[in-house]
Image (cartoon, rainbow, N blue to C red):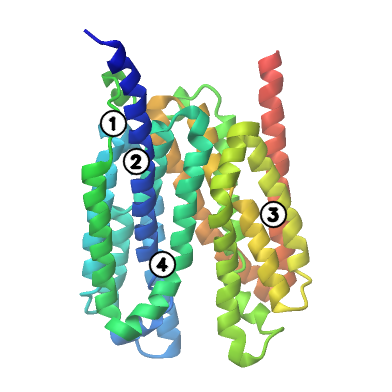
Amino acid sequence: MTTDADQEQKPETFERAWQRNLWVCTFGSFTTIVAMTLLLPFLPLYVEQLGAQGHAAIVQWSGIAYGATFFSAALTAPLWGRLADRYGRKLMLIRASLGMAVAMSLIGMADSVWELVALRLLAGLLGGYASGSMVLVAAQTPRARTGWALGVLSSGIMAGNLVGPLVGGLLPPLIGIRATFFLAGGVIFLAFLATTTLIREERRPAAARAGGSGRVWSRIPDRRPILAMLATGTLLMVANMSIEPIITVYVAQFVPPAQVTLMAGVVMSAAALGGALSSARLGRLADRIGHWNVVILCLAIAALLLIPQAFVTTSWQLVGLRFLMGLALGGLLPSIASVIRHNAPEALTGTVLGYSVSAQYVGQVVGPLAGGFIGGHIGMRAVFLGTSVLMALGAAVNVMVAHGRRRDRVS
């Protein structure tokens, strides 16, 4: 027999559980993202140590090794999402954290560039902690707090992207490249222990667990919001990554040669810092005014901020504009996940969020490729202006889809 005290205690217990889940997932996502990005500053040095000779070979193998993780992660994200729907979200986080801990340690033991590439592929295959955290937090958080919770988690992810290269620049001179990978694996193992012991997942009905199988798209009543969010996720990463290939050359127009590398790093970090600072606040705002409204607002502001970036005359102007753009884009990740959560059936939440992660990885690949091609053949200003047009189109498409949904409801 359930007493009044039990009924009063249950909401409090659930409140503590979802908040503890959020902080553990944020810590785990931060550590795994740091591990995936810390090798950026020293990757060419490691590739050279493993046997690559000549500038062209070192650059080529560095690009292949870095992109390998995101390639395999993009292919497997929907699979892990579907398995999370069927067998449990916590189980997928345990798998990802243990797999990443092992993979990072093995990378520190590589003996050739082929082994490095293979192990980077393995890291992407076994990883997916951040995307799995999105699924668990979106599913376990009360709907009224979803935007804020996903904003906090997004802040941890963006902070990992910011801190990773900094750690990668500081540790190798102190402890060596291989020891840096071993240390990263050890920190991720701590995330594995925290995930295993501290995260609590609410049990779902057997029918909901079985619902993860079968055809996905035919079981979504209205696919327009989902498709709009997949496209928006791709646009987000294109906007963040399109200037990566040209930033050093672009900054070189405004600063002395000795300061080019430092200032390029500051410009790259500015957007990540802005996103980390704004994600939780914009997520909370989305809970109040609507997640779709925040998506449209963020896309429109980013489109406007990209225009003056094409006409800056000093490097600090570019740093300030990239920081403001990061503040605007910080609301997109939590809002995208929230819109998907509210429009996908409960049994398919993980699967659809997995597709969302894959769409974002597509943007991470397309952004640098398109930015490098346009910057080399048309001009660097065209990269900023072209990206601005894409973001404006994304905002317009989201307005039309949202308006169409409201019109159908009224009808």
Q: Residue 389: name its quadrant.
A: bottom right
Q: From the image, tell me which residue sits under label 2.
A: 21
In this picture, residue 36 sits left or right of residue 114:
right
Look at the numbered discs 1 and 3 and tell me whether their residues touch, using CB distance below 8 Å.
no
The amino acid beneath tag 3 is: Ala
Look at the numbered discs 3 and 2 and tell me whether their residues touch, using CB distance below 8 Å.
no
The amino acid beneath tag 4 is: Thr
Which of the marked residues, 1 or 2, is nearer the chain's N terminus?
Answer: 2
Which of the marked residues, 3 or 4, is nearer the chain's N terminus?
Answer: 4
- Tell me the mark number nearer the camera, choosing from 3 and 2: 2
Which of the marked residues, 1 or 3, is nearer the chain's N terminus?
Answer: 1
Q: From the image, tell me which residue sits under label 3.
A: 302
Which of the marked residues, 2 or 4, is nearer the chain's N terminus?
Answer: 2
In this picture, residue 23 sits left or right of residue 326:
left
Q: Distance of mark 1 from mark 2, alpha carbons? A: 19 Å
Q: Is residue 180 visible?
A: yes
The amino acid beneath tag 1 is: Arg
